[in-house]
Image: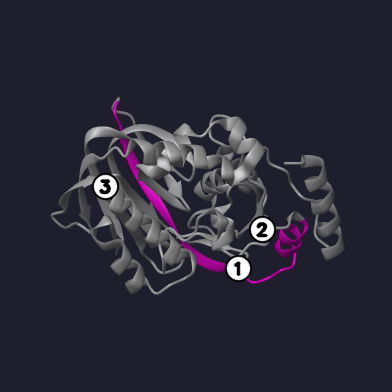
Amino acid sequence: MDLRRLRRVVTAEARAAGWAPTVWVATEEHDGGASALRRVLARVRPSVVIAAGGDGTVSVLVEALADGDVPLAIVPVGTTNLFARSTGSPRSLTAAVARAFAGSAPVSIDIGRFRATLDDGRVVERPFTVMVGAGVDAAMVADTHPVGKERFGWVGYLQGISASVWRNERFAAHVALDGGPGVSESAHSVVVANGGLLPAGLVFVPGALVDDGELDVMVLRPASVLSWVRLGAWFVASAVRAPLALGRSLAGPTVQVTRARRLVVAFEVPERAEADGEDLGLVSRLEVWVQPLALRVVR
């Protein structure tokens, strides 16, 4: 990110719109900037908070803004920016900043929240805006080299995805939705999404919306070459926005998609997990729930 250019654009747009000077908050290594933002919010009441970064930066700042009345605007300068795409933020830095200062009425959208019990007994709890899960998405994050991500953007993630597909490792887990008894799964991936978009125009979870009061749960079970072909057909159908029923028929039992407000995933053996592009490490239990309309966003 070109910070000097960002500052120039923000200063110019704020001045043109007649706004007061902008308060700048730098991210911090220990929590990504949530604490610094809370300190600013304690002494200043901003009209809008602009998150300049990717999905990880946005999800950290959401911790300070959730269930409040200060809206969030996103300047998507990260690698994937899936939440920005889900909420319709302009891809251009200048256009995104201009929208933040345009005075548009914000809308309320859902966020997710998770509580992960790590294999060493520690518990991590925080919000997420895009997805949390174990399997292909976690491998994508863990196996992608930082240089490839920095140099090639979302294309750099193909390294991690390819490694996950090549290994085709499955894990045993018990998945319970909305307080039900749950089922035991032998899965390649379990992903919980707030929105359904992926880079390059792909749709991971067709029909997933950021304001429907539910989370979309996808379980992938490819076990053979044919099932991987079925999984590929699912993504092709999703990319061309084919009806969900057609995608289900093509995927067969390889893909299971359902919706829930809350779920618990207990892994038989601790499994690597991720949340909004951040590696959580090995997780033995994952609790996930939705916070309906908990975030105000400038769209």
What segment carries the magenta color?
94-119
The residue that disc 1 covers is 106
Q: Residue 217 in the image: state x and y as whole percent.
A: 32, 57
Tell me if label 2 and label 1 are in contact, CB under 8 Å. Answer: yes
Q: Residue at x 27, y 32 (%)?
A: 270
Q: Is residue 14 left or right of residue 57?
A: right
Q: Is residue 100 magenta?
A: yes
Comparing labels 3 and 1, the label whose residue is closer to the camera: 3
Which of marks 1 and 3 precedes in the sequence?
1
Residue 117, compared with residue 256, is above or below; it is: above
The residue that disc 3 covers is 224
Amino acid carrying label 3: it is: Ser
Q: Is residue 267 left or right of residue 135?
A: left
- Secondary element at tag 3: loop
Q: Residue at x 54, y 31 (%)?
A: 145
The residue that disc 2 covers is 48
- Secondary element at tag 2: loop
Q: Residue at x 62, y 48 (%)?
A: 41
Q: Residues within 10 Å of mark 2 (few under 14, many from 20)?
A: some
